[in-house]
Image (cartoon, rainbow, N blue to C red):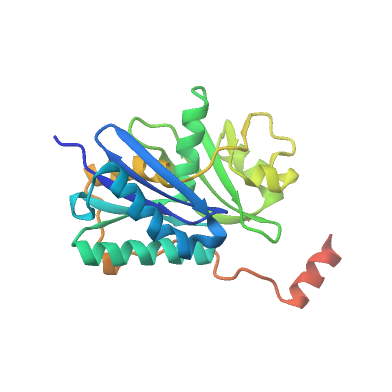
Amino acid sequence: MRVPVVLALDAATDECSVAVACGESIVARTGSGLLASAQILPLVDALLQAQRIRLTDCDAIAFGAGPGAFTGLRLACGIAQGLGFGAGKPLIAVGNLAAVAADAFAQDADARRVLAAVDARIGEVYCAVYERAARRPMQIVAPQLARADELPALANQHAVDTLAGNALLAHAACAQGFGGRLLPQARADAAGIAALARAAFEAGELLAPAAAAPLYVRERVALTVAERQARGAAA
């Protein structure tokens, strides 16, 4: 069976990145998340030209579906949709937390069950639990929003042995009292998304461009003044 050629895009963090998985190799390029709207298409063009691959040579276009930065998620999804429509290619939505977990499993061969967590601002994190599996992480707990100080209890509840993701750098409370492995540098990027997308392609998990959508998890990115004051009083 031919290994699929997959183009992947991600703009869910402070970096934007693009990658192409062709054969056994994955090649990526990175730009600034703040400049993603101006950089991501030129990055795609430069990457494909460097690899001597046309967009029509790709079997599918993958994007980091989230959760993550709202604007970045919309951007990656929208560009993937445009490219998919234009080239007549299906899309693959890859969860960013699954990519964080995959990176954690790659970093630590002893990790078996990972709680992947990324900073969601205002004292909260996006998190999900994954178990090591042969082709890609197996989701045990779906992506959700939690307070940073709730992570240790969530890890204990689901027999997690590893906490991973930038939430550990943003919130000390994430790991307070947790006795397992800590992998704060584990992250999602287009290269990791491309790797997971190949497994999804082989499993037939393809979307028509019109059906693609980001996974926001949280519908708001800021608190009202009253909500901030209430949180301050509770603290």
Quarter placement of the C terminus: bottom right
Q: Which residue is pictured at 43% across the width and 45% down the height?
A: 29
* Residue in the picture at 56% in, 34% down: 159
Q: Residue at x 15, y 36 (%)?
A: 2
Report which quarter residue 76 is drawn in.
Answer: bottom left
> What is the x, y in percent for residue 116?
54, 43
Residue 222 x/y as whole percent: 66, 70
Q: Nearer the viewer, residue 154 or 164?
A: 164
Q: Residue furthest top?
A: 110
Q: How many marks?
A: 0
Relative to 191, 158 lies left or right: right
Where does the image place residue 84, in percent across and percent down from the top left?
25, 62
Whether residue 170 is visible: yes
From this view, report whether residue 132 is shown above or below residue 48: above
Residue 117 place in picture, x, y as percent: 58, 46
Q: Is residue 93 visible?
A: no
Residue 162 in which image quadrant = top right
Q: Quadrant of the N terminus?
A: top left
Closer to the camera, 4 or 123? Answer: 4
Taking the spot 58% from the left edge, 42% from the top edge, the residue there is: 165
Residue 234 placement, left or right of 160: right
Whether residue 232 sits left or right of residue 220 in the image: it is right
Is 162 displayed left or right of 24 in the figure?
right
